[in-house]
Image (cartoon, rainbow, N blue to C red):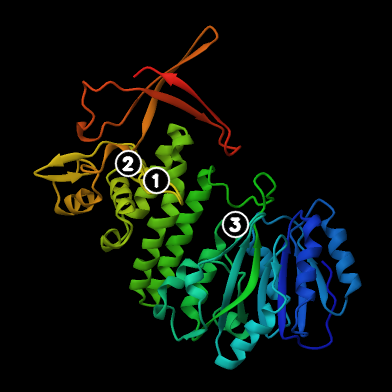
Amino acid sequence: MSVSLLVSEPDVTIIVIVYNDAGRLARAVQSALDQSLSGVEIVIVDDASTDATPRVAARLAAARPDRVRVVTLPENSGGCGRPRNVGMDHANGRYVMFLDSDDTLDPHACRNLVTAAEETGADLVSGRCVRVQPEREQNWYPSLYRESRVLTSISDEPDLLYDTLSTNKCYRREFLDREDLRFVDRLHYEDLLFSAQAYAGARKIAIIPHRVYNWIVVPRGETLSITHRRSELRNFADRLEIHRRIDVTFRLRGATELIKHKNVKFLNHDLLLYLRELRSRDPEYRQAFLDLAQAYLETMDSAVFEECNPMMAIAGYLIVQGDLRAAMAAADHVPRKGGAPTLSLSPVERDGRIYWSGTYLGAEVGRRILDVTDLGIHSAPLGTLTLGGRLTEARQAGRELLLTGDFINPLGRIDATVELAGKLEIRDRRRKGRAFRVPVTL
């Protein structure tokens, strides 16, 4: 562990965490050195890298010993929490910011954030983050950052809970110490908990529309992150544990409405991500996922289901009932951006109303949540419906692969006497646009 002392108290300490990212660390640090606000120090926290990162970090510190320090952890922590905590322990600035080694700061980030904090007295200032992709840029929750605002409570703008990033924000160091705010260690999604605790503890929150953080989206296959593999069950278990801790944070402050608001976001966003990927998981994974999700969703206020996306309300309700197949079908019917919803389960009709499932209509809450009459599935032209299907058998016969399956006939609307024709389309998931079609017998 090496530390070089700075002469005076800087305005901002930028904590740059890095692990095995020698190729991009210098770019991140340079964006911190290039800040238009001069009183900035950089603390690089190396999470026990095994590549050339230590040499790069040492070279950066040697070039600017007045502004750059390096702290090296003795062993890898397996996440972002501990490196950021160690960085906070070494911060001298009146304000603290976080920067990942594969991202960059806007040149005026520190100046704009600190100016807002000084003018408003805010404990926390949040600015606009931009996701930078190879061919385009996308603002992160742009509706939150259209104008400058000062909030006296997160309850004044609960949608801020959707911005769970810790990196597009500036924190008053006295506030971090007063609230004893630190990142949780050994859990994925530490940002979600830290941000929620910061929002809940801040006496004032300032929001500015200025661009402050560049989230560089790494092309598929090049990411170094080990913390966000949704294919691992621990990933989902950690997310649920983080949400439970957020619930405790808000409950201790009497902010039950924030719990409900956060849980609506969990259903609309978090749960949807996992349900969409479940078809590629094995039965053991699916059952373990169902057990975890069911236990958490059972703790939610039923009012959450009334306020979220109708199809995700159905998905959450069916998970509570233990019906994962029908829940996955509900997630299929939430259209992806630019796409159409897929109908992979046939609804039922009861007394002139259309329901997603006919199995759970004994209770009034079930009838209310499962009622999809207003979606118009029963009346929409068949050509506008994307009908899902399933593969029931795959068998090799010599050089031929024989596939057998079925597809949904919603409410029996496709008459048995109609002559049908179809093609099987096989797509490459990893290479967009690569596909071929073969005729099938229906």
In terms of secondary structure, where does tag 2 sit? helix
Comes first in the chain, label 3 or label 1: 3
Which of pointers 3 and 1 indicates the residue nearer the eye? 1
Q: Badge 1 is on which residue? A: 340
Locate residue 202, reporting x and y percent: 50, 82
Q: Is residue 86 visible?
A: yes
374 and 371: which is toward the camera: 374
Q: Badge 3 is on which residue? A: 186
For the point 36% across and 30% down, the residue is 389
Q: Residue flagged by tag 2: what amino acid is it?
A: Thr
127 and 253: which is toward the camera: 127
User: How far separated are the C-alphas under marks 2 and 3?
Assistant: 47 Å
User: In the image, 150: left or right of 211?
Assistant: left
- Indicate whether 430 appears above or below 127: above
Residue 384, which numbered label? 2
Q: Quadrant of residue 158?
A: bottom left
Comes first in the chain, label 1 or label 2: 1
Q: Residue flagged by tag 1: what amino acid is it?
A: Ala
Contact, mark 2 vs mark 3 (Cβ under 8 Å): no
Locate residue 229, reporting x and y percent: 57, 47
